[in-house]
Amino acid sequence: MRHRLYYLLPDVTVARAALNELLLARIECRHIHFATAGQTLPPDLPEANLMQRTDVVRGAEMGMAVGAALGLVLGIALLYYFDIDRAGVKAAVVVLATLVGMLFGTWASSMQGASLPNSRLASFMPELEKGSILLMVDVPAGMIDQVEGMLANRHPEMHFSGEESHIPTFP
């Protein structure tokens, strides 16, 4: 399991230096992401992708739960409306309706979430609008102290802004 560490950086020069330090610490480039409030980043800095910038994941999670619940209710309503007698068919109708509702809810809510900014990054927006750069780095749980110490010692201008656990190992 990985943990996501958040750092606010003052400018592009510090961002490049932090990227180099993380690469030297053997953090893969695919686990390092930079975000701004709209300013363009140089091409050598890995920019946050759709999954980090928007609420796609949160939308999919919410849609999956709501869609499954509504599909279950629809499946039960279908049983009473069509008056199905066989137990195996009843179970199949309810399960199928629940799965269809879950899939549709996941799809619809993730599409809606793609149009919204990431709610987890809302606390960083005032600083990002002032021109700061947000560094998001996903590190293995065993390397958290090492990475935090290294960045704090070599880059005192960086501000540690939080940690989030439960980041999947494989993106």
Image (cartoon, rainbow, N blue to C red):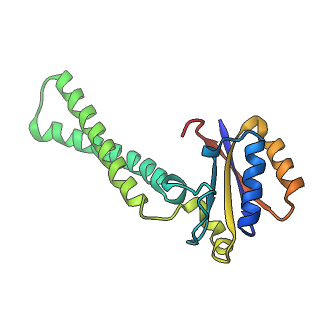
Furthest residue in direction left, as rendered: 82
Total labels: the figure holds 0
Q: Quadrant of the C terminus?
A: top right
Location of residue 127 by image quarter: bottom right
Q: Position of residue 164 (x, y in %)?
A: 67, 49
From the viewer's perspective, is 156 left or right of 108? Answer: right
Furthest residue in direction bottom, as rendered: 130
Q: Quadrant of the N terminus?
A: top right
Location of residue 131 by image quarter: bottom right
Q: Position of residue 33 (x, y in %)?
A: 62, 54
Name the residue rendered at 45%, 47% in the picture. 61
Location of residue 29 by image quarter: top right
Name the residue rendered at 73%, 64% in the picture. 8
Q: Is residue 82 above or below residue 152?
A: above
**Nearer the observer, 141 or 50:** 50
Q: Position of residue 67 (x, y in %)?
A: 33, 47
Name the residue rendered at 66%, 39% in the picture. 2
Name the residue rendered at 45%, 54% in the picture. 56
Q: Is residue 8 above or below residue 88?
A: below
